[in-house]
Amino acid sequence: MNRLVVVSNRVPLPSAGARAGGLAVALDGLMEKRGGLWFGWSGRIAANVAGGQPALSGIEQAAGIDYATIDLTQDEHDRYYNNFSNGVLWPLLHTMPELMKFDRRDAKVYREVNYRLAVSLQPLLRPSDVIWVHDYHLMPLAAALRERGVKNPIGFFLHIPFAAPDVLAAAPEVAALVRDLLAADLLGFQTDNDVANFAAAAQSLAGATRLSGQALQFGGRRVKLGVFPVEIEAQKFAMMAGRNAFGTTGERLRRSLDGQKLILGVDRLDPTKGLLQRLDGLECLFEKHPDWIRRATVLQIAAESRKDVGSYQQLRAALDAKAGSMNADLGEPDWQPLRMVSRNVDRAEVAGYMRLAAVGLVTPLRDGMNLVAKEFVAAQEPDDPGVLVLSRFAGAARQLDAALLVNPHDPDAMADAIDTALRMDLADRRARWRSLWDAIADRTPALWGRSFLASLMRASQPVVNKPAKPAEAAPTSPPRLTLVEPTAAVGGRRG
Ligand code: ADQ
């Protein structure tokens, strides 16, 4: 079996402690079976890069997997990670270009870091390796590897949405990034909408040609596109929720509610998650439906993230102000509508809170998938489940269409949906929950990974009876023709 090389911005180093969530565990599983190398940034800032030369900062081994990393300088971290990845690409790809702060110097350093990663990775590669690159931090990486003569199969998966071409055009660098992505053999996205947006951008911004069977032709090569919705370990999450609802923290929350219904939100504090709009909707709920005063309480866990990015600092301040005024305006001496927690809460604890909630609020303005929505479904007690209120702009809405779907920009609609959820009778709650559970129960991150890799192997298979055309755009990229049959993963899922 070919060795799997995973490249991601942050490498979950075993020496750094506990493994992160589902994806790291799933990819570990795949790499343990076939041998693996995980490559990327160590998470450390180096004083400077020795003599300007790319150098590995560390190699570790655990459970048959090698971990190789580079350090970033402070300037690289600021420009590549904070300013360009999180300050330009994140808002742009989420169709929020007004939040983007473009600076050519950041775009240059973003590209340079990707090239430095390619230079460091290349000597570690074996001819039979399969390379899987993750997310928006690494859009130029496949092209940088091809320029260095790397001929291995390369797949790229985008965890966040892909915006429409006219939105993308707001950032000068983006056409080049679309061309760079086309150096991969397979490009994976969360939803068919993202595939359609990428295909349109590749045609209008990069001059690619659309082929049948979800494929593009560019530079004499075929590039396969596919939909691979990220999944969770639903069965394991359900068990964790069951255990923790009755643990110390779960019991403490339940006692503090004193019989009130719990409305729960769990997010990273991020402009895409629609937190200010959610508070508008909640304010509207208590104004339009005042019988919920003293009968329902909102717990919003909004863990702070990306504190170095200006728009995140502004959002934190705006959210604190809004939460304060909501409690002051609507609160009573013996009741407050909202409890807000901005620290990172342990996953197991969160799972228990989800089980206790009557309503789960997942209302991003836009989201690649949103695993919280799937986790909320998994956490419910089947005989007495809570109700999911879900933004129609989350990728998860494609699979979880039995939730109460809302437009997060419409506070009245959100308030009415929450009211409906709070009043929903048991038979309706059970029926909706069963349908939601069926959409996630048999899928796992490991199956997601296997499906992507199977598609990548098919996409990179040479077709022997057809001569490959010479590459036009990237002279050093390997000429190859690929089988582009639609796969089970493409359009085969609900979504
Ligand atoms: P994220 O934007 O980070 O991920 P999401 O999918 O909602 O968002 O959450 C990822 C994980 O973080 C989940 O396991 C969730 O429980 C946990 N989490 C979120 N907020 C938390 C909090 N306040 N406290 C504790 N845990 C919390 C990106 C994309 C998503 C896509 C994922 C995976 O933005 O659209 O679903 O990658 O591809």
Image (cartoon, rainbow, N blue to C red):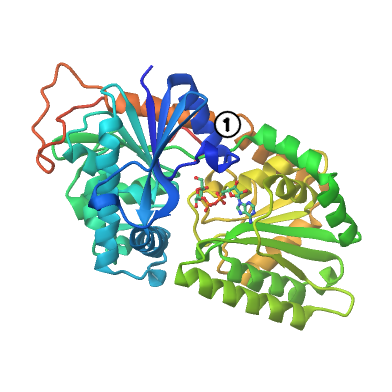
In this view, 476 is above or below 296 = above
Rendering coords of residue 483 (x, y %): 26, 24
In this view, 399 is above or below 465 = below
Q: Nearer the viewer, residue 76 or 479?
A: 76
Rendering coords of residue 109 (x, y %): 27, 59
How many marks are shown on the rendered structure? Answer: 1
Which residue sits at x=81%, y=45%? 245
Where disc 1 sits, the SS reads loop
Which residue sits at x=76%, y=51%? 353
Rendering coords of residue 135 (x, y %): 40, 47
Q: Nearer the viewer, residue 376 or 152?
A: 152
Count neighbours of disc 1 (C-alpha within 10 A) and say few if under 14, some if 14 to 19, many if 20 or more: some
Left or right of 167? Residue 452 is right
Left or right of 63? Residue 380 is right
Residue 213 image-quadrant placement: top left
Residue 479 seen anywhere in this rendered image of the structure: yes
Instruction: Tell me the quadrant of the picture where the N terminus can be found.
Output: top left
Which residue sits at x=65%, y=35%? 234
In this view, 397 is above or below 305 = above
Residue type beneath disc 1 = Arg
Left or right of 312? Residue 129 is left
Residue 381 seen anywhere in this rendered image of the structure: no
Q: Which residue is mark 1?
A: 443
Residue 56 image-quadrant placement: top left
Rendering coords of residue 246 (x, y %): 85, 44
Which residue sits at x=91%, y=61%? 258
